[in-house]
Image (cartoon, rainbow, N blue to C red):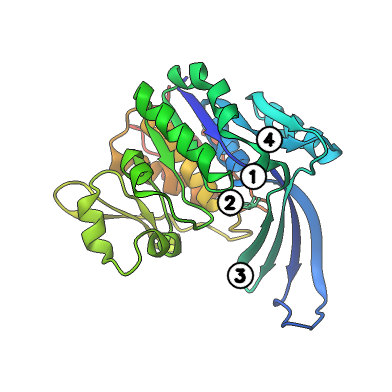
Amino acid sequence: MVKIGVVGSISTDFVVEAQRRPLVGETVYGNDFGTSFGGKGANQAVAAARLGGEVFMAGSVGDDSFGSSLLNNLQANNIDTQSVKKSQDMPSGSAIITIAEGDNSIIYVAGANDNYKPEDVDQIADLISTLDIVIVQNETPIDSIERLIEYCNHYKVPIIANPAPARAFSSKSLKKIDFLTPNETEFELLYPNEDMEDVLKKNANKLIITLGSKGAVFYDGNEILLVPSYKPSSIEDTTGAGDTFNGALAVAIANNFRLYEAIKFANLAASISIQKKGAQGGSPTIKQMREHEHYEEKWDIK
Ligand code: RIB
């Protein structure tokens, strides 16, 4: 099994479904409401664990009933939570999600996720040195993310940074990231007024831009390659598809897949994930992947 560290957010998703979003000052009827497990970090950890990774999660939950459920859920997905701290007197992180008109919009309230400090990253330095790969997103304080990137560099452990939600990284940190996985909006924020092709060419085998239902692009040193997505048989909920992509990408890279194949593997996992409700609800197991008609024999997961 490959060893994967995920540093990031652990939240409860409060999900409402409606025909359309209300205008300012307007009330509309909703069709459904529910809570589910979320947080970009936790979603990526769950995706990696279901696909066969040995996953270690680091982050912070509140000292409330949500925090206990969030931890139980991670443990039920075989994730090591020893590095998740319980922050006293803070609410657990939450996300208010509206699903309408075929897509989602999210308000993220960090709560205890914002209490994951650079000193907490220091506490996991020894663990980092033993990992095959690390994943981080943008729902954690930036100084903690930057400390993590320093450790990964120091121990030569590859790191995937998923810059979601969109927020600028320092250029020093950007240089030290091994894989950067923005979507188009996040790309524009990170590289304002720059041409996508030019930036891809300056970041061979590092910058992977996800393009939703079109797939993902990267530059392999010779040419810009589009790795097409797989058409799902149905679309139930796209929330967390990017997280499943990143978790699966980490598993594939840690299993030494060539980057093109790693992205293909991640695309397949993401396409399966949107066929069920919830950010983690449809994230596939390695068994489900292997049974899929598009799974490739050469994808050897240890
Ligand atoms: O990427 C989807 C996730 O982002 C949701 O689970 C929610 O927690 C949000 O922050």
Binning the other alpha carbons within 10 Å of mark 2 as few (below 14), some (14 to 19) or many (20 upward) gives: many
**Label 4 beta carbon less than 8 Å to ligand 1:** no
Q: In the rendering, at what x and y percent does residue 119 appear?
A: 58, 28
Q: Contact (CB < 8 A) between labels 2 and 3?
A: no
Query: Would you identify the image quadrant in which residue 96 lies?
Result: bottom right
User: What residue would you read off at disc 1?
Assistant: 280
Q: In the rendering, at what x and y percent does residue 148 appear?
A: 47, 32
**Label 1 beta carbon less than 8 Å to ligand 1:** yes
Position above or below: 24 against 206? below
Secondary structure under the numbered disc 4 in the rendered image: strand
Extreme residue toward the right, this view: 65
Q: Contact (CB < 8 A) between labels 1 and 2?
A: yes
User: Between disc 3 and disc 4, whose residue precedes?
Assistant: 4
User: What residue would you read off at disc 3?
Assistant: 102
User: Between disc 2 and disc 3, whose residue precedes?
Assistant: 3
The amino acid at mark 1 is Gln
Extreme residue toward the left, this view: 222
The amino acid at mark 4 is Ser
Secondary structure under the numbered disc 1 in the rendered image: loop
Q: Nearer the viewer, mark 3 or mark 4?
A: 4
User: Between disc 2 and disc 4, whose residue precedes?
Assistant: 4
Binning the other alpha carbons within 10 Å of mark 1 as few (below 14), some (14 to 19) or many (20 upward) gives: many
User: Between disc 4 and disc 1, whose residue precedes?
Assistant: 4
Q: In the rendering, at what x and y percent does residue 113 appear?
A: 67, 42
Q: Contact (CB < 8 A) between labels 1 and 3?
A: no
Residue 60's disc is: 4
Secondary structure under the numbered disc 3 in the rendered image: loop
